[in-house]
Amino acid sequence: MVMGASGSKLEKALGDQFPEGERYFGLENFGNTCYCNSVLQALYFCIPFREKLLEYYANNKIPGEAEENLLTCLADLFMQVSQSKKKTGVIAPKRFVQRVKKQNELFRSYMHQDAHEFLNFLLNELVDILEKESSAVKDSPHSSSPEKVPNGSVQPLANGVRKEPPVTLNSSITSCLKNFCSTETLNAEDKFFCDKCCSLQEAQKRMKIKKAPHILVIHLKRFKYIEQLGRYKKLSYRVVFPMELKLSTSDDVDTEYSLFAVVVHVGSGPNHGHYVSLVKSHNHWLFFDDENVEMVEESTLQTFFGSSHEYSGNTDHGYILFYEGLGGKNTPDLFFFAITIDIFTNECNIALGAVLGRKKNKFLTKKKSMGKKIDAPPIEDDYSGVSDVESSSTAILQMRFGRSATLVASIPVASTRVGC
């Protein structure tokens, strides 16, 4: 359902620079559904994701045969926006929101919800739907069998939790990622048990990205439980997120990424507030606040870095960052790689927005996650000085859209052999 013409000011602002074929639509709020709207805008302007979804819509839109689910509702919503005769306006994603509430009771109330949890839930659902469709195609006697994906599991990290240096009140995404990939020495009580020597040995460990993802999602964990208050409170620490960043792989190749969307949380706690999003489209930055859409300068993003104080009167902070790899090839696979950064401890955890229909829909750390294994593990632990170490890999989301499509949540296990 398309309503109104609230984007007329935007059309005037862009004038002749309005991108050909592009649409900028606000989304109606159905009572605290800003968490949903902000994530949907970020995903819509994730161009590879949008293209795959519209391709899926075109290949599967058979009147009277398509069973409604969250994927068909999302594809239909994206199609409404992209095929609208108007360039701007407001769309009511009523059917999609109703489907979300039907699928998960967490979102049925009119209470404030978490955008990060919603993104996780949505990707989980896409995994389940496309897996079922893939299984149906495989079981069909007239279909060719798709590539078999063996089961896999995740081994725990050596000697428990990875240690990180303490965060400062003025941190950056770049520094956090460098700390994440830095070498860690395992000694004293943290020595690694070598199965070959049957003894504790000193070792060095380093995280390596083995396969660069197409889309890098970074979640800034800004909520901390305060025991004295008996509740969570939002941290206002300043975290600088750059427009461009590099991610090193195990081949020492730097993959460049460009920021294209930011979901912003407005408020002082996780149980109340508001979500908005900023997206980059055709070198223009746009601000989406439910029904309202307006152009902003790139410098506006700096206002959402945070402050130099633990708690601040300014409660508008970047919460979920979306980066797209530059110079990537057009492939049938779309890889999402999600990292959660605890801005209080500076600890980076690998997280995934889909865990193959597990009971609890959460972003999980490597220690707790399980999924399916693919041939190319995206990340590996390198233990120097330890032999026959089976290192735990991490999560990756592989999307294949099409009639014989599959969407696989993968947390593969990589193995490294080095001298004792």
Image: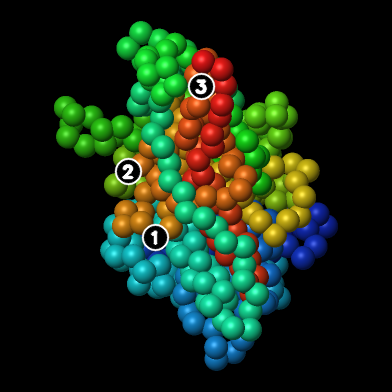
- The residue most toward the top is 188
Q: CA distance from mark 3 to mark 2?
A: 45 Å
For marks 3 and 1, the one nearer the N-term is 1
Above or below residue 72? Residue 284 is: above
Location of the N terminus by quadrant is bottom right
Q: CA distance from mark 2 to mark 1?
A: 25 Å
Q: Which residue is mark 1?
A: 357
For marks 2 and 1, the one nearer the N-term is 2
Residue 178 lies, in percent from the top left, at: 57, 22
Colouring scheme, one of rainbow, by chain, secondary structure, one colour? rainbow
Kind of residue sitting beneath label 1: Gly
Between residue 30 and residue 104, name the one nearer to us.
Answer: 104
User: What residue is drawn where x is 31% and y is 40%?
Assistant: 269
User: What residue is drawn where x is 55% and y is 58%?
Assistant: 149
Q: Which residue is mark 3?
A: 387
Residue 270's mark?
2
Report the mark closest to the observer, 3 or 1.
Answer: 3
